[in-house]
Image (spheres, rainbow, N blue to C red):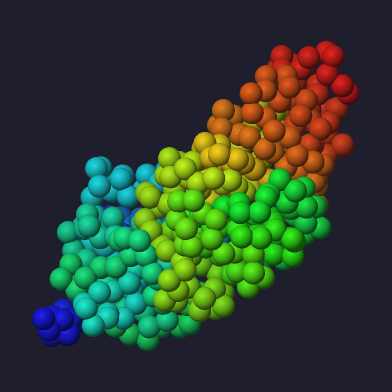
Amino acid sequence: MDFYSEYRSKLRTPEQAVQCVKSGDWIDYTSQLGFPILLDRALSKRRDELFDVKIRGNLIFNKLETVENDPSREHFIYNSWHCSGYERSLCDRGLCNFIPMVFRNVVPYYTHFLTVNVAMVSVTPMDKHGYFNLSCSTGVSKGIIDKADIVIVEVNEHLPWLCGGFDEVVHISQVDYVVEGEHEPLFELPIAEPSELDKKIAASIVPYIQDGACLQLGIGSMPNSVGNMIANSDLKDLSMHTELCSDAYYDLYAAGKLTNARNNVHRNKGMFGMAFGTRKLYEWMDHNPGLSVCPLAYVNSPELIGAIDNMVAINNCIALDLYGQVSAESSGTRHISGTGGQLDFMTGAAKSKGGKAFICLTSTFTDKKGQMHSRIVPHFGGDIVTTPRSETYYVVTEYGVRNLVGRTTWERAAMLVDLAHPAYREELIAAAEKQNIWRQSNKR
């Protein structure tokens, strides 16, 4: 078949392609590097003729022209499944709303409940078989495309082609319009330099990891500090099963630690659902048969995660209360990020033979005024609970590691006080007494 003739027949300028959008429509931009920069820019130019156009996306790092050009939100209303730093700033300005979720359920939400009038997604150039690769946004993109009334793909010449298990491509026959144009080099997000506290926390976790373990490293400098420390350890034959593939995994591979050889479920394959990082990561992933990108509904399934032996999940959080509840997405009522896959991997790793699930946090933080605060608090007052106390296992601060599994409320309180900064321990004990979760024989 002549796929290139079909391609040419569907080729449009960005301005022509977005003419299909109508007032009141639901538009989807998929995720991170799948964000259609040219189409968003073209759609923003239609601002004055469109009203109440709702847009969904997540982990968008580039400027959203539709949002920035409509501060009244009369024309475009943006909503995110998981906030990047940029989207967090939009939330602070009242220009973005969060959509509660866990990542494994995002595509099923679309399948069963949501409307997609137009899906717009950046893809690799088409191959000779008529396929575009969904690249770093594979985790959610195909499910959204399948639900959409109209599908527009924006060809980004810089995207890596990622090998996959399934749903990593879309065929020209499934596409309504194709858009081309020059793009800036891919957005890069280097791993933040770990602090001394990050390194101390990482050093506490590494002894719990054994040869042949399978790693999930969440977003942030702290989980990546663990990856860096492992890369310089004596551990070997590690595997990757994660929602996000970041530079930490490339570093593990380059150090000879990441082989995937002992993964009992996907032997010799590093499994992930989405990716972003630096150029070295994108080059490593491109056409790499040792890596497999799949939908997050599969990758983040607790049943699948639990079937992997020695699964180790490492995630961070913003705050934790004396009951063991974890908040990783808000500070009070201020929205920060999202649930993401933390709950998926906490639940799955706990089912794994030899599995361990870690929540990491520094014991304190310093606000913009220079005032120090405890991250371990008596109880939450408006903070969004990401992981319930019933799913919290190992908790790690710079003061050590405690396993909360099966522990009573007074045992948990005592353990978490031990992990708090010494300056706050007495007031946490007083709060625990008032909350009736402190046993008088608990050590002070």
Give coordinates of residue 305: x percent, y percent.
48, 45
Nearer the observer, 338 or 132:
132
In this rendering, does residue 322 appear at all? yes
Q: Is residue 428 left or right of residue 263?
A: right
Give coordinates of residue 415: x percent, y percent.
76, 29
User: Which residue is found at the position 61% from the left and 54% from the top?
Assistant: 212
User: Which residue is found at the position 73% from the left and 22% from the top?
Assistant: 411
Give coordinates of residue 427: x percent, y percent.
82, 27
The quarter of the rendered structure image containing the C terminus is: top right
Q: Eyeballing the image, is 278 above or below 78?
A: below
Q: Quadrant of residue 112?
A: top left
The quarter of the rendered structure image containing the N terminus is: bottom left
Q: Eyeballing the image, is 356 above or below 9?
A: above
User: Which residue is found at the position 29% from the left and 68% from the top?
Assistant: 169
User: Count of labels shown?
Assistant: 0
Give coordinates of residue 162: x percent, y percent.
40, 71
Q: Is residue 67 left or right of residue 380?
A: left
User: Which residue is found at the position 31% from the left and 44% from the top?
Assistant: 109
